[in-house]
Amino acid sequence: MKMRRIDHIVLTVSDLEESTRFYHEVFDMPVIDQQNSAQLVTLRCGHQLIRLQKADRPTELKAPHLTTGAADFCIVAGDKLDDILHHLKSYFVEIVAGPVEKHGSEGPMTSVYVHDPDNNLVEIAVYKNK
């Protein structure tokens, strides 16, 4: 079996509206589906999706021990680092680390780290020569 890419990730959130607003406004991710009755919101992140769910979402298809603030993931940005830093500052998003030089799946990159409303660690990366 060949794995090609990650299609989506699901984050468990404490406040669906607040987290939706954060990912939509701060990261400019369009909301493509909002199922309030199912307590699930889907946002587009490039070619992938980020789904936000409440821990008590009524479904059998979820991890057995859902918790908020346990995720640590990286988003590749298409903007210049200075523009990203200015944008985060304009939304009063605290940078918890960076800029730091890192090595990602496509080579050297520069990253900054922020927390989302549930304290998930979100790395925002800009690849060199991309």
Image: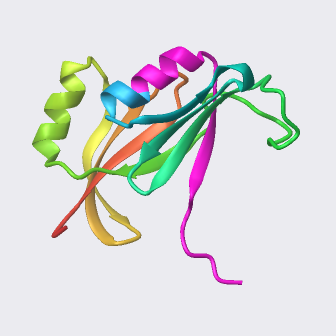
**Residue drawn where x is 16% and y is 46% of the image:** 81
**Residue drawn where x is 18% and y is 35% of the image:** 85
* Relative side of 32 to 2, left or right: left
Q: Which residues are magenta?
A: 1-22
Q: Is residue 101 visible?
A: yes
**Residue drawn where x is 39% and y is 49% of the image:** 75
Say which quadrant the N terminus sits in.
Answer: bottom right
Question: Foreground: 79 or 59?
Answer: 59
Location of residue 123 with respect to 115 vertically, above or below: below
Location of residue 5 with respect to 69 vertically, above or below: below
Image coords of residue 105 (percent x, y):
41, 70
* Relative side of 78 to 80, left or right: right
Say which quadrant the C terminus sits in.
Answer: bottom left
Question: Foreground: 67 or 25?
Answer: 25
**Residue drawn where x is 23% and y is 52% of the image:** 78
> Residue at the bottom extreme?
1
Image coords of residue 129 (percent x, y):
15, 70
Image coords of residue 28 (percent x, y):
32, 34
